[in-house]
Amino acid sequence: MDKVEQLLNLMGVTAQPWWVYLIFALIPLCILVSIREFTCWFWKINKIVDCLERIEERLMFAEQRRPDAREEKKPEKAREFTLGAQRKDKEQDS
């Protein structure tokens, strides 16, 4: 500890109580938190996050109510297209 005090004395800094260092450490932290809160308020980020969370909850609820929702059903046209492509491939092979 003596070396630290000597180094501080060489730099012209006198030893201060611990609470002074704590205050100087908390001031930038408070400024950064205040700037972050202002930015979130200005760009409405908190409201957007709330809205997205509600949408996600509703989607999860709707998904739970429809057990067949996970099965991917192809539309008729897509099914016809794939069957037609398979027939053309078979015709080319023979």
Image: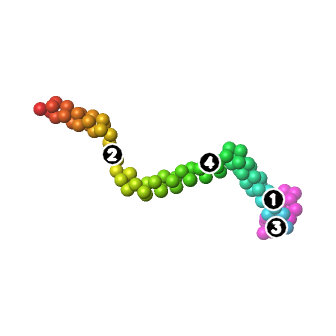
Outermost residue to the bottom? 1
Of residues 76 and 47, which is closer to you in this image? 76
Indicate which label's residue lies in the foreground, 2 or 3.
2
Sequence order check: which comes first, mark 2 or mark 3? 3
Q: Which residue is mark 1?
A: 24
Q: Residues within 10 Å of mark 4 (few under 14, many from 20)?
A: few
Sequence order check: which comes first, mark 2 or mark 1? 1
Where disc 4 sits, the SS reads helix
Where disc 3 sits, the SS reads helix
Q: Which residue is mark 4?
A: 48
Sequence order check: which comes first, mark 4 or mark 3? 3
User: What residue is at 82 percent from the left and 67 percent from the top?
Assistant: 18
Q: Which residue is mark 2?
A: 73
Q: Which residue is mark 3?
A: 18
Marks 2 and 3 in Cβ contact (< 8 Å): no
In the rendered image, residue 23, in percent from the top left (x then y), is placed at 81, 61
In the rendered image, residue 28, in percent from the top left (x then y), is placed at 77, 54
Magenta-span inclusion, residue 15: yes
Q: Main secondary structure of the magenta part?
A: helix
Q: What whole-number distance in Å separates the C-alpha atoms at marks 1 and 3?
A: 10 Å
The segment highlighted magenta reads 1-16
